[in-house]
Image (cartoon, rainbow, N blue to C red):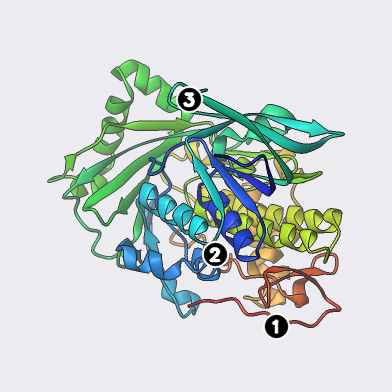
Amino acid sequence: MIATSTQVLVIGGGPAGSTAAGLLARQGIDVTVIERDTFPRYHIGESILPSCLPILGLLGAREKVEAHGFQVKRGTYFEWGPDEWQLSFNELGDTTPYAWQVIRSEFDELLLDHAAELGATVHQGVTVRDIEFHEGRPVAANWSAGKNGGDESGRIAFDYLIDASGRRGVMATRYLKNRRHHDAFKNVAAWTYWRNVGTVEKSPEGSTAVISVPNGWFWVIPLHDGTTSVGFVCAKSSFDTRRQELGGPAAAYEEAIAACPSLDELLADAQQVKEVRVEQDYSYTSDAFTGPGYVLSGDAACFLDPLLSTGVHLATYSGMVAAASIGSVLREEVAENEAFGFYQQVYRRAYERMLLLVSVFYQSYRGRDYHFYHAQRLSSREVDQLNLHLAFLRIISGIEDMEDAKGAAYDRVLEELSGGGSEPGRNPFENLGKLRQEPLSADDAIDGLYLSFGPTLGLRRTSEAAPDQLDRK
């Protein structure tokens, strides 16, 4: 039975929701998760970045993920136009130079079950039908459950709301109407699963292989059950045309593979074991990630592009910051407007960092025909909405010398964004620092606030002294 009230209601039990709920429960806060599906449930987005490891450690879920047997991922292999290179995570200088390739149905269920073990109340197979507001603030949710879509129903009041409802984006799409799709990245992804796929010998263990073709690119992700996820990304208009001409998405997908010699070779002895799936209209952002009494977390706030596998990273990171922000408000350590202003800036800058990086990466392509890649250029409106100088400085903050940011490296980013050239063989990551998202500290506080990991996860003022240990075990 679902309670009639809770301190914090989380809509959605994916990585963003389960991370936020678990970390709130660890703080002794009454938190309830309402998840529409019944886990395990299928989800795409199988490649995890090393930046998720410290957050899993903070949750106390790191050892469970380690023990599950997911495919260890030690880097990424790129065959990008005429160039190829490997990005090994051990180059990051971290003590944990790896991540995983995960079957999301298993990974997401593990995290949601762990949140329940930490004390979060979790309800699956329950749909939020509508949200009630009082003077612009969400205060309650009406729900229904049951196989017939309404066998049971009720109302749950709350003090704070975390919308982690994924692409559905309950708040953004139904009430706020503040989601906008990117002018760039109007792409489609088509994928399926194979067995007995060949191995890219030059790649680090368990790597994601990213292989470009003139009209798009492929991902190749090995999974621990012996299957391999193989996906194709191209312009939506181009895919729609070929799908209609060839008689369906599977035929368009197969044609794309045949036009990619290196992938065709990897699949020479492979067997397709699932039907082709298609997703589109997945690159978007909300104009604001917070408001009175609520935050948008994970895909409910924004999603960029599958190129650099940033989805789970942004989900778990935003879930952690949401738990820290709301926890501090409930303990009356900071005011709501301060905490939510902090959340907005931190999550927005993490997203913009990736937006800039993906755009530069796409624009580095210099193959025979790069119309697809040219189309990924940020529009003048989108560029105007970014502070490019600050965005780039944030990418390399604490990693590269500030003089590099003001000199050649910064100039290179501006050159790429303005359509300038690129010498053959140059790794687009070369001057963009590391992908790792470092936790904030007093040295890079925002409006006098920073994330503190001890003795309790929360926000702390720079004037306060406190231990700041994040469990990286």
**7 shown above or below 86:** above
Q: Tell me the amino acid under the disc marked 3.
A: Ser
Residue 86 on image: x %, y %: 38, 65
- Sequence-wise first label, 1 or 2: 2
Between tags 3 and 2, which lies in front? 2
Q: What residue does disc 3 label?
A: 237
Between tags 1 and 2, which lies in front? 1
Q: Are marks 3 and 2 in contact (CB under 8 Å)?
A: no
Residue 112 in view of the camera: yes
Residue 182 on image: x %, y %: 63, 36
- Sequence-wise first label, 1 or 3: 3
Q: What residue does disc 1 label?
A: 467
Q: Residues within 10 Å of mark 1 (few under 14, many from 20)?
A: few
- Residue 18 vs residue 345, the one in the foreground: 18
Q: Are marks 1 and 3 in contact (CB under 8 Å)?
A: no
Label disc, if present, on residue 435 of the rendered structure: 2
Q: Tell me the amino acid under the disc marked 1.
A: Pro
Residue 306 on image: x %, y %: 47, 46
Please report the residue visible at 52 percent of the width from the left and 22 percent of the height from the top. Answer: 150
Residue 76 in view of the camera: no
Q: Residues within 10 Å of mark 2 (few under 14, many from 20)?
A: some
- Residue 212 vs residue 456, the one in the foreground: 456
Is 194 left or right of 221, judged from the image as shown? Answer: left
- Please state, as top left, top right, bottom left or bottom right, where the N terminus lies in the image: top right
Between tags 1 and 3, which lies in front? 1
Q: How crowded is mark 3: few (under 14 residues within 10 Å), some or many (20 or more)?
A: few
